[in-house]
Structures are given as C-alpha cells and as structure tokens.
C-alpha cells in the first residue's frame, strides 16, 4: 500500500459571448479543479467553445489548460495530454511566454506521473530557460520544484535535492505562498530515500507555513503527507491521527479527491495497527470516492490496496478480483507505475492459490515493466526502494520456479503411481469383464430359452384366437345360412303347397254353392284359416332372416354379439348405446347389425386387439357408428380392402351412409360411419 497527498474548492457562471465571460469560465474552472473536477471540466469546455466562437485564442489556451488539469484530477492522463499540447501550441503561436511555461510545467507533471521522465525533463529545461530569461522568479521556482520531482521519479535522488533547495530559497526570498508545497515535495524525496527525520522536519515546516498563510487546502495536504512519514517510521497510531486531521479538512473544503486519499492513508495505518474491519471500511470509502469523481488512477491504487488487505485475510480469490479490476483500469488509462504494483500483488495472489504457471507469467510481466520504468536510472540507485522491489520480485520468480519444479516432480511421481494403480485396476476390470461376460452369456441363454417358450405359447394362443374367430365367423355365417335355408324352404315348398291347396279350394267354390247353407259357412271358415296359414308362412319366412333382431331389437342383438366375443383377460369389449330405445326400420337395423358384425370379425381376424369399443349414437336425423380397437392397425392409403371391407362399404352405401377410417400401423384403428335415419 502507498500513502498520498492533494488540495482545494470554488463556484460557476454563464452569460453572452465575450472575453470577460471566457475568462470567468477559466477562473471558475480553475477554482473547482480539485473539489469538483467534472464541473470544472464542463465549465472549461464552455469557455473553449465560446473563445473559439469570438476568435479569442488566448482564452482557448487558458481554458484548455483548465481542461487538462481537470482531466488529470479525474485520472484521464491521455485526454489531459492532448488538451495541454494544443494549449501549448496556441501559446507558442501567440508568443505568450508565461503560457508556454505553464503548459510545459503541466505536461511535465503529467509525464512524470506516467514515468516518462525524459520527456518531462526536456519540457522543464525549456520552461526553466524561458523563466530565467524573463526574470520570472515564481515560475522559475515552480519549474525547479517540478524538475526535482521528475528527477526523484527517475531515482536520481541526489540530483533532485539541488532544484528543490533552489526553489525553496527563491520562494523564501519572494515570500511565496507556494513555499509549503516545495517543503512537501522535498519531504517526499527524503521519505523515498529513507531519511525519515529530515522528511518529518520538512513536513513540519510545510504545516507551519500553511498555518501562517491560513491555507486550509495546503494544511490538509501537509497532514496527509505527515501521516505517510508516521507510517514509514512504524508509528501507526499517529499515522491514523494525522490522516484523520487531513480527512476532516478535506471534507470541510469539499475536496473529494483529497478525502479519498486521506481514507487510503488512514486505512494503511489501521491495517498495520491490526484493525482490519476499520481498514476495509476506509478502503470502501476510498473506492466509492474515486468512483464518484471518476479518478481512475486513484481507483486503481485503491484496488491494489484492497487486494493487499484481502491477501492478509487469506482471501486470495477476492484479492485476484480486485487486481484484475485495477489492471483493466491501468490498461485503459496508460497508468504504468500503478500497473507495476498491481502485477506484483496479482503474482502473490496466484501463488497463494497454487496457480504457479500463471503466477510466473505475471511476475515476469512485472519485472519487464519495472525494467522499463527503471530504464533511465543509474546503478547508483540500486539500493532504492523500487530497485529493491524489483530484485525482490526476481527472487520471488526464482522461488516460484523452484516451487514449480518441485510440484512438477511431485506430479510426475503421482502420475507414475496413478499409472501403476490404473494398470492394476485395468487388469481387475478385465477379469471382472470376462466373468461378467460369462455370467451374462449363461443368463442370455436362459433368457433365450424362456423367450422361445413364451414365443411358443404366444403362437399357440394366436392359433387358438384365430380358431375362435373362425369358429365365431362360421357360427354367424351358419346361423345366417340356416335361417335363409329354412326361410327358403318355408317360402318355396310349404308356401307353394298351401297356395296350391287354396287354389283347389277356389275351384271347388262353384260346386259348393249347391251345398247346404250350413256346409257353405263351414267352407268359408276353412278357406279363411287356409288364407291365414299362407300369410303366417310368409311372415315366418321374413322373420327368420331378421333372427334375433326381430325378437328383441338392435340393442339386444349387439349386446349378445358383445357377450359372444368378449374373453376376460384377453379381449375386453366396451359397448356404448345411446338413443336406441325406439326401434328403427327392419332393413336399417339389419344393415347396421351386419356392418358392426363385419367390422368386429375383421378386427378379430387381422388386428388381434386386447381392447375394442363399439359405440352407436342416434340423434335427430342420423345414426353414428364408431368401432375402434387397439390392435396392430394399418395404413389406409396402402392396405387393400378384402371381402370383409367390401361388404362393409356396400352395406354403408345401401344405407346411404358415409364411412371414415382413422388407422396407423401400431396404433390401432377407428371406423366411423354416419347413416341418415328418418324420424
């Protein structure tokens, strides 16, 4: 975790385009750059737009500088660089020496923060030359202060002391309000060099100067930096106290970026003091603050500190999540120094999780990035904190490689043992498989024998079933033929004989007239009885054809049919009759009965069903006949009709009805017949 520091606050305006309004936008934006960077950015953009509208180039340049400052506060270094370069080009074109110096200073600060020290020093050399030529001591002091910071970033600590002291001397001589800032920067240098007592003394000077100038923003920054010294000296309780003081002032000044940094420093003190819950609460506040103001750099640092906290709590998975979030932010915003720290922490998290290959890859990326950041530093700084950090990382890489080698050897041993165990398991499995196959073969043979017995029984049952159907058909056909034969004999033989007798009696009628009156009456009586006998023979002949229908009607005949074919456990027959209380015409009942009889016989003969349904429903004007079964079914489009179906179709046509067939192989069949009936 790293400790940090910051400053300030202000207000806004709007009216008609003019130089005064453009300058007021610049002033308001500059005042808000620390406390409300988003609002400062909005005002400066309005100032740029208005300045371009009225052709006020200087106003464009000054407002662009405000835009860059706000973008820096928001952690958007790439956008800030573009705005500042444009502002500097305008100032150079206008010959605005102070504007060029200001732009060079701000660009140099940006490059320094990104670790691009060579570019920063080139710009500061240019600004220093312009300031010395113009005799502008305040700009010279500011430039020297920034040069010290750039050299410090490059690890050239001894060289950076000189410009810092020269800046302090100039500001003391000119009684500058910025003196406290230089004290703070030089104190930061001594802090990096491990010269904590000198750093503490300089931060003390910074606080005294800020109190003297009644600069609350600088005082808050002084407290923040002082907390960093206390932390480095291991005085964690005092670190928390100074961070508390800084936080109170930042919040009073509505300085959100400063408050977020104060939360970060206080969290560090609490963590070292063992207050992990307090640490998490302060880090949550820092993360929320940086998210609210859109400061991507601060947010990335907060992610790293959160990851370090979770690692100390043995939550490596959670730490890895925070590292990945922080690394994504650094990639998008070009924050290479912060990225370096996050890679280091991510390597620790991966190693804790046992993901050694990934940990090695991350640590190598870290060392490579650290090399590029330290590339301009001389061998004299090998003892610096950052160089020690780099070589600690190299040592950790070596440890990781040793751990990986040990793990690979252990893995190889495990694989060997696993192989041997697998061979034994395979041998056992083969023996088990052979035994299983033998057992299965025996069981299969038994099953085949059982299936053959069952098949034989099924065939016997089918043959019996077919015989039953044939017997039933033969019985029905025999009954029908017998009735026809008897009817024919009655009609042809007995009927003709009675007719002949009647004819002979008719011939005798003339002679009967001469008989006695009493004998004439007796003759008439005999002749009447003979007439009745002829009619009775005709009626018996007709009724013999109708069979059971003449005795008890269609319903009873169908019930008798159902009872004659139903076999419990083998064929269940459902009979549903509706509206047959009133009799229909004899020919209609005979035709309907023969249709049902034929359909039942066909089903028994071809479909071999276990269930059958016969339904007759008589409603106004028509009779519905439905015969269905769950047998083998057939395809009506393919299957050819036999004699049975031809009989059904012809009988349906005789009754002026319609036949519909719904059948499919394996899904049974349903025959629906609609017959018109006169009421």
Image: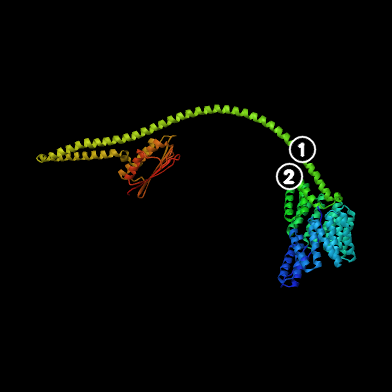
User: Of helix, strand and loop, which one carries label 2?
Assistant: helix
Query: Could you tell me which residue is drawn at 80 percent across and 68 percent down?
Result: 96
Q: Is residue 423 above or below residue 332?
A: above
Q: Which residue is mark 1?
A: 406
Provide residue 280's location: percent of width, then percent of height.
77, 52
Give the quarter of the image for residue 467. Answer: top left
In the drawing, does residue 552 fall left or right of residue 237? left
Q: Is residue 539 above or below residue 126?
A: above
Q: Earlier in the sequence, mark 1 or mark 2?
A: 2
Provide residue 114's location: percent of width, then percent of height.
78, 56
Binning the other alpha carbons within 10 Å of mark 2 as few (below 14), some (14 to 19) or many (20 upward) gives some
Circle on res. 22: none
Cβ atoms under marks 1 and 2 closer than 8 Å: no
Circle on res. 358: 2
Q: How many marks?
A: 2
Query: Could you tell me which residue is drawn at 90 percent across and 62 percent down?
Result: 169
Residue 235 visible, this angle = no
User: Of helix, strand and loop, which one carries label 1?
Assistant: helix
Q: For the residues marked 1 and 2, what is the alpha-carbon distance in whole angstroms?
A: 16 Å
Residue nearest the viewer, comparing 14 with 391: 391
Binning the other alpha carbons within 10 Å of mark 1 as few (below 14), some (14 to 19) or many (20 upward) gives few
Provide residue 665's location: percent of width, then percent of height.
44, 40
Residue nearest the viewer, comparing 510 with 382: 382
Q: Is residue 122 above or below residue 560?
A: below
Give the quarter of the image for residue 400. Answer: top right
- Identify the image's colour scheme: rainbow, by chain, secondary structure or one colour: rainbow
Residue 502 visible, this angle = yes
Q: Which residue appears farthest toward the left when viewing the image?
A: 514
Provide residue 544's location: percent of width, then percent of height.
28, 38
Residue nearest the viewer, comparing 447 with 182: 182
């Amino acid at each position: 975790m790293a400790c940090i520091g910051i400053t300030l606050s202000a207000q806004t305006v709007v009216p008609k385009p003019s130089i005064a309004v453009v300058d007021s936008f610049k002033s308001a934006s500059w005042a808000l750059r620390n406390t409300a960077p988003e609002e400062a950015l909005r005002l400066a953009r309005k100032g740029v737009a208005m300045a371009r509208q009225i052709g006020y180039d200087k106003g464009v340049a000054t407002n662009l500088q405000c835009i860059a400052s706000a973008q820096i506060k928001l952690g958007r270094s790439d956008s800030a660089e573009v705005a500042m370069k444009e502002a500097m080009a305008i100032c150079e074109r206008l010959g605005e020496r102070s504007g060029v110096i200001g732009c060079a200073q701000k660009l140099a600060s940006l490059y320094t923060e990104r670790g691009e020290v060579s570019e920063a020093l080139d710009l500061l050399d240019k600004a220093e030359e312009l300031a010395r030529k113009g005799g502008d001591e305040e700009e010279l002091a500011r430039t020297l202060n920034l040069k010290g910071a750039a050299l410090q970033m490059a690890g050239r600590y001894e060289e950076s002391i000189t410009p810092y002291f020269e800046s302090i001397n100039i500001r003391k001589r000119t009684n500058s309000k910025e003196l406290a800032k230089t004290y703070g920067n030089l104190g930061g240098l001594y802090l990096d060099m491990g010269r904590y007592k000198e750093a503490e003394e300089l931060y003390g000077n910074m606080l005294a100067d800020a109190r003297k100038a009644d600069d609350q923003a600088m005082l808050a920054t002084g407290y923040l930096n002082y907390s960093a010294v206390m932390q480095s000296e291991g005085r964690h309780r005092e670190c928390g106290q100074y961070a508390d003081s800084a936080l109170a002032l930042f919040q009073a000044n509505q300085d959100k970026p400063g408050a977020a940094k104060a939360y970060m420093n206080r969290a560090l003190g609490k963590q070292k003091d063992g207050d992990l819950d307090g640490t998490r609460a302060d880090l949550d506040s820092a993360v929320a603050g940086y998210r609210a103001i859109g400061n991507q750099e601060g947010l990335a640092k907060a992610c790293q500190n959160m990851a370090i906290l979770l690692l100390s709590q043995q939550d490596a998975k959670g730490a890895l999540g925070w590292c990945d979030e922080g690394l994504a932010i650094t990639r998008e915003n070009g924050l290479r120094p912060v990225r370096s720290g996050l890679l280091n922490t991510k390597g620790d998290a991966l190693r804790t999780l046992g993901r050694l290959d990934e940990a090695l890859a991350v640590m190598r990326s870290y060392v490579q990035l650290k090399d590029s950041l330290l590339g301009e530093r001389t061998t004299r700084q090998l003892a610096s904190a950052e160089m020690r950090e780099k070589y600690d990382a190299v040592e950790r890489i070596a440890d990781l490689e040793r751990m990986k080698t040990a793990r690979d050897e252990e893995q190889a041993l495990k694989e060997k043992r696993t192989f041997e165990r697998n061979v034994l398991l395979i041998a056992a499995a083969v023996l088990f498989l052979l035994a299983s196959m033998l057992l299965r073969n025996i069981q299969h043979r038994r099953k085949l024998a059982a299936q053959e017995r069952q098949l034989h029984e099924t065939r016997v049952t089918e043959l019996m079933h077919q015989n039953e159907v044939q017997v039933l058909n033969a019985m029905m056909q025999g009954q029908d033929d017998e009735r026809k034969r008897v009817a024919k004999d009655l009609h042809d033989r007995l009927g003709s004989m009675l007719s002949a007798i009647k004819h002979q009696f008719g011939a005798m009628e003339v002679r009967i007239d001469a008989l006695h009156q009493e004998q004439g009456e007796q003759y008439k009586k005999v002749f009447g009885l003979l007439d009745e006998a002829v009619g009775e023979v005709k009626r018996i002949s007709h009724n013999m054809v109708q069979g059971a229908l003449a005795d008890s009607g269609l319903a009873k005949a169908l019930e008798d049919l159902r009872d004659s074919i139903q076999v419990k456990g083998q064929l269940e027959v459902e009979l549903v009759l509706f509206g047959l209380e009133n009799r229909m015409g004899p020919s209609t009942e005979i035709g309907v009965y023969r249709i049902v009889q034929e359909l039942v016989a066909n089903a028994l003969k071809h479909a071999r069903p276990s269930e059958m349904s016969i339904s007759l429903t008589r409603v106004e004007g028509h009779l519905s006949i439905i015969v269905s079964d769950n047998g083998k079914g057939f395809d009506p489009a393919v299957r050819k009709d036999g004699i049975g179906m031809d009989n059904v179709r012809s009988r349906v046509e005789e009754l002026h009805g319609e036949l519909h067939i719904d059948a499919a192989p394996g899904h049974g069949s349903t025959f629906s017949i609609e017959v018109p009936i006169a009421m």
